[in-house]
Image (cartoon, rainbow, N blue to C red):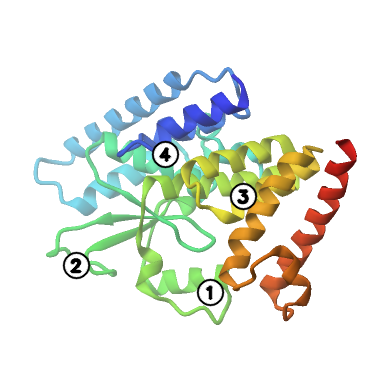
Amino acid sequence: MTTPDFVHRFTEIATTPEPDLASAALFIAKLEYPRLDTSRYLAKLDEMGATAAKRIAASGETVDPMSRITEISSYLFKQEGFTGNQNNYDDLRNSFLNEVLDRRTGIPISLSIVYIEVARRAGVEVHGINFPGHFLLKVPMPPEAVLSLDTEVIIDPFHGGGVLSESDCQDLLQKHAGAEAAFDRHVLSRATKPEILVRMLVNLKRLYVNMKSFPQAHTITELLLGLDPSAITELRDRGLLAYHLNRYAAALRDLEAYLRFTASKEMIRTPEEIDNHVETEEISEHAEIWEHVKALRRRVASFN
């Protein structure tokens, strides 16, 4: 499958009105495993969901919502042995759903997808939370339930499905965002399925860049732009990665477009005006990109 075909097919799967999260996540894995049989892993999730449903049913006809979550967590983390890979967090395999299902270990985002998909198949509603630095889950509960966070239970799948209090969430936020970070309930907002996929792809892009696997990282930016064509930072990154891949005309096109979009926010009419603008962090980045653009223009002109 060519890269354009790969990106097109992923975009079709991921941008439907109600995308199948597991199918999209497994399709991403084809980037590393082109011959991956995704149907085998979807069947495995079906089997796990059926087992979880049986455990819930065995608990009694009037089992309460919290007990259902307890059964799912016990099944996944105790019986099946899923765990967070704390010793080798940046292992690329932690980010691919097929590897997580095979190896029973992963990172917060990939373990969350396993949990969401198994719970859905067991008839339990679970949502993702784009928590800063550490993906979490939440389960809506009936108003009469007595819970630490009103009508929601917050779950950390990286640490054995532990239930977090509001104080726990505050501590986790400060751990990842700094001691000065102020906790606000908006950080516990429900993540949409496209947002979950974006989080997974951004993690993968970081890993590939650190590995200097620029072709794969470039494809990731294509997937991210397929999910959100207005993602300006991905346009920038696609241009920078194209530069590393010696695709100079493509790099020039993306970086010039990035400058046009971002400069308009600062009321800069042309990239050249950056040279005369007051130095700020954002303008400094513009200036750095502008230097790349000037070098690329010279290089591209030399080929003509």
The residue depicted at 57 percent of the width and 55 percent of the height is 232
The dot on residue 114 is 4
Is residue 115 depicted above or below 47 in this figure?
below
Give neighbour class at mark 4: few <14, some 14-19, many 20+ (Cα, 10 Å): many
Cβ atoms under marks 1 and 4 closer than 8 Å: no
Name the residue carrying label 3: 235
Name the residue carrying label 2: 146
How far apart are the two marked residues, 2 and 4, measured between alpha carbons?
Answer: 27 Å
Q: Amino acid at mark 3?
A: Leu
Q: Secondary structure at mark 2?
A: loop
Question: Which quadrant, please, contains the C terminus?
Answer: top right
Q: Amino acid at mark 1?
A: Gln
The dot on residue 174 is 1
How far apart are the two marked residues, 4 and 3, measured between alpha carbons?
Answer: 30 Å
Give the mark, 1 or 3, whose residue is nearer the N terminus: 1
Q: Position of residue 242 (x, y in %)?
A: 74, 41
Cβ atoms under marks 2 and 3 closer than 8 Å: no
